Amino acid sequence: MINTYRFRAESKQDVLKLQRILRGEYEISPVRGGTSGVEVHLESPFTIEEIIRFIESLPNSNVMYQTIDLEEKYTGEMNHARYRNINN
């Protein structure tokens, strides 16, 4: 089964780091509305919990970590309830 996710990242470079360790089909575009960063559409067989584990393994991944969600639930907003200090 393929799942579809959306998330934001601070830069395209952050997404490229994730792409090296997480298989899937990625579409990367600039964030709309003048906000810096990129927005990502990801199709992957992995669950959101598994993808979050991949994201947690990367430095400076807090934006991806806090914004990833299933496409139908995605808002683009930071999920502060999901905050962890994972990027020291």
Image (cartoon, rainbow, N blue to C red):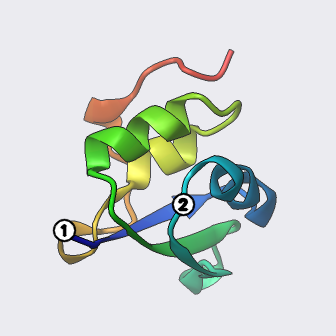
Relative to 64, residue 29 above or below: below
Q: Which residue is mark 2?
A: 23
The picture places residue 44, in percent across and down from the top left corner, at 39, 66
Left or right relative to 1: residue 31: right
Residue 10: which quarter of the image? bottom right
Frontmost of labels 1 and 2 is: 2
Residue 32: which quarter of the image? bottom right
Q: Residue at x 64, y 71 (%)?
A: 38
Relative to 74, residue 15 above or below: above
Circle on res. 34: none
Q: Which residue is mark 1?
A: 73
Which sits in the foreground, 19 or 67? Answer: 19
For badge 2, the amino acid type reads: Arg
Q: Residue at x 19, y 76 (%)?
A: 72
In the picture, which quadrant includes the C terminus? top right
Q: Residue at x 41, y 53 (%)?
A: 67
The picture places residue 9, in percent across and down from the top left corner, at 61, 58
